[in-house]
Amino acid sequence: QVQLVESGGSVVQPGTSLRLSCSASGFSFSHYGMHWVRQPPGKGLEWVAVIWDDGRKEFYEESVKGRFAISRDNPKNTLYLQMNSLRPEDTAIYYCARDSGFNSFGDYLASWGQGTLVTVSS
Amino acid sequence: SYVLTQSPSVSVAPGKTATITCEGDNIGRKNVNWYQQKTGQAPILVISNDKDRPAGIPERVSGSNSGNTATLTISRAEAGDEADYFCQVWDADSDHWLFGGGTGLTVL
């Protein structure tokens, strides 16, 4: 079955960088778009970014545009989120999720990982 | 930008029907998806494309969408249905995936 395992979460100071990883298994990774979604403590879900199955296109939520970069390594079945210039408001659980579309974008997020916690604090 | 609005909380008695709504401008023209998130767990998809149930989701969970309101209905509510429920759409104008603020369902 689909398995997504995030890693890389940590406590970091404002202005620093962090890279999250998401290891995927149980499906043909190179044929699906992949998302990052975050959830601040006690709050709702916020979509962060998406990358096409072949990595050629990416889209970002406005507050992270220019600071975060989503990427993927298809041979390694791994998704990444490079986060730069981190702010306290970036504190959240970060989930990776598989898009619903095969070889194209779908409307929804079909499978989710368990998340990794990023805390930005001085 | 497109906004999805959900009531913060809904309560339902065991065995009764819970109705959770998601409002948006002409949301009936979009595909609406619903996620359930229990305390301390990751979200899971419970309804896709307005009314489709993924494998393993019981028939008493259903969805509809028309006009400016999408609805998630949980019939014969059980204690195990207690969770936060989030609606979600894909906004073609911005190529963004958008979530509603979430509704906390209490079964009591």
Image (cartoon, helix red, strand yellow):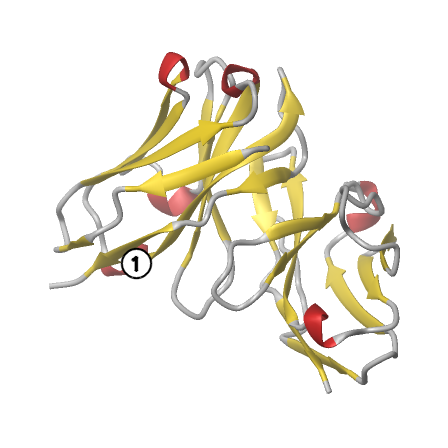
Quadrant of the image containing the C terminus of chain B: bottom right
Q: In the depicted view, which residue is nearer to us: B63 or B68?
A: B63
Above or below, B16 against B61 in this view is below
Q: Label 1: few (<14), some or many (≥20) within 10 Å?
A: many
Identify residue for label 1. Answer: A91
- Chain identity of mark 1: A
Q: Residue at x 81, y 82 (%)?
A: B14
Residue A62 in picture, x, y percent from top left: 41, 43
Apparent side of residue B11 relative to residue B38 in the rendered image (left or right): right
Q: Residue at x 51, y 20 (%)?
A: A29
Q: In the depicted view, which residue is nearer to us: B59 or B106?
A: B59
Tally of marks: 1
Apparent side of residue A31 relative to residue A37 in the rendered image (left or right): right
Apparent side of residue A73 relative to residue B103 in the rendered image (left or right): left
> Can residue B1 be spotted in the picture?
no
Above or below, A83 against B1 in this view is above
Q: In the depicted view, which residue is nearer to us: B9 or B26?
A: B9
Above or below, B42 against A37 in this view is below
Q: In the depicted view, which residue is nearer to us: B44 or A55?
A: B44
Residue B47 in picture, x, y percent from top left: 76, 49
Apparent side of residue A77 relative to residue A53 in the rendered image (left or right): left
> Can residue B103 be spotted in the picture?
yes
Residue B70 in picture, x, y percent from top left: 80, 56
Residue A13 sits in quarter: bottom left
Secondary element type, mark 1:
loop
Residue B16 sits in quarter: bottom right
Amino acid type shown at disc 1: Thr
